[in-house]
Amino acid sequence: MSETPTLLKPISALRHFLHSSASGGILLMAAAALALFAANSDVSQAYQHLLHLETGPILAPAIGAMTVELWINDGLMALFFLLVGLEIKRELIDGELADPADRRLPIVVALAGMIVPAIVYLAVVGGDRALVRGWAIPAATDIAFAIGVMALLGKRVPPQLKLFLATVAIVDDMGAVAIIALVYSHGLDIGALAAAAGTLAIMAALNRRKVKALTPYLLLSLLLWFLVLRSGVHATIAGVLAAIFIPIHKSPGVPDDIESPLHRLEHALSPWVSFVIVPVFGFANAGVALGGASLGAPVVIAVASGLFVGKQIGILAGVWLAERTGFARRPYGVGWTQLYGVALLAGIGFTMSLFIGGLAFPGNAALVDEVKIGVLAGSVLSALGGFLVLRFAVPVRR
């Protein structure tokens, strides 16, 4: 009996997501390597001059004139977070996390995978008040980078293992967004916040009236970004807030429904985010001069340890705890050695860790550089470790 298109659609959607993430992750690796070369070569001054070049007006008095770096971190990354928000909403309403039972394992694992790295970070920096603000840096996972490493392994990684990592990373993203909104916002402008709330109310009204056209939502999202930028809440949060109000049509078995505004926007954004925005962010934020770096600095050790040690302990402990208590079971046909490889790959915190590091220590270039070195060290160790474990792991026989 031939398979129907309805049954094939979800597999196609999953493969499309994993393929785009894998390709984007490999491109991100290249962008990070290029940034390191630029920061440690004769073009280092030109590289820094480009990032700090003033290219726009003062949109928010708190951050001053817009520079190339600000346009990337506060502007382009808002589109990255918009895509993150769309993916979270789709998975919760019409995807792999729509069934409450399917949310159990990713939630437990993601929480453990965020809490343990934070504890490791705080244990290393001790009571140094100046460094405590960076506790969330090793808590996030870079799904594009991790899936990119998996792509290098080909068929040695079963699809259910990739899906497990993807769903854990989606829940992880929810936690990272909450941390950015609650911990790394400052000097709030109540007037701008009220106007942002009004903009969201208009988007909600359009949603209730079943407006399917994306143009009004996109225009209101742009206004929302400007208001959130002025409010003191980090501007990228506007992307996630806007995603909440993009309409979605529940379509079981047809995740690419062209009538669904959310699906249309997600598919339009995905290639731009994967192949342009994230690599550009990596190029702008991974460049650090290694010559004058202190590899033994507390922040470097804390971040690297949180990613490489804390993540693998947290992920494995979360799976073990869920199974031990009967709360949830690990993916079918996946052994503990393969799960250990995934736990290591979860320690690749590149994009989100660099992003949070810049928010944790604003204006302190020395500490931000130490964060970058710690993120690079922890991510590289995690990538190599995860690759080797999965490369030689014996597949579980069903």
Image (cartoon, grey):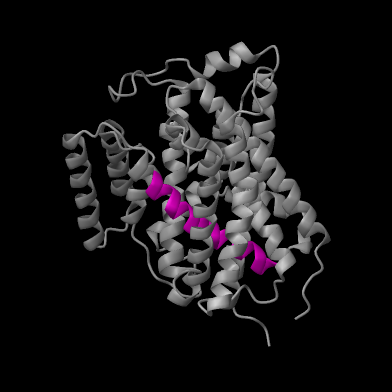
How many circles with numbers are drawn on the protein? 0
Looking at the picture, does residue 295 appear above or below residue 2?
Answer: above
In this rendered view, identify the residue nearer to me: 219 or 121: 121
State left or right for residue 237 relative to residue 253: left
Looking at the picture, does residue 124 appear above or below residue 204?
Answer: above
Examine the structure image and report whether residue 159 is included in the region drawn in magenta.
yes
Q: Position of residue 294 (x, y in %)?
A: 64, 23
**Highlighted range, magenta:** 158-179
State left or right for residue 282 relative to residue 260: right
Q: Main secondary structure of the magenta part?
A: helix
In this rendered view, identify the residue nearer to me: 340 or 28: 340
Q: Position of residue 257 (x, y in %)?
A: 46, 66
Examine the structure image and report whether residue 41 is included in the region drawn in magenta.
no
In this rendered view, identify the residue nearer to me: 384 or 281: 384
The C terminus lies in quadrant: bottom right
Q: Residue at x 68, y 64 (%)?
A: 339
Q: Position of residue 26 (x, y in %)?
A: 68, 43
Q: Residue at x 66, y 52 (%)?
A: 345
In this rendered view, identify the residue nearer to me: 301 or 144: 301
Q: Quadrant of residue 285?
A: top right
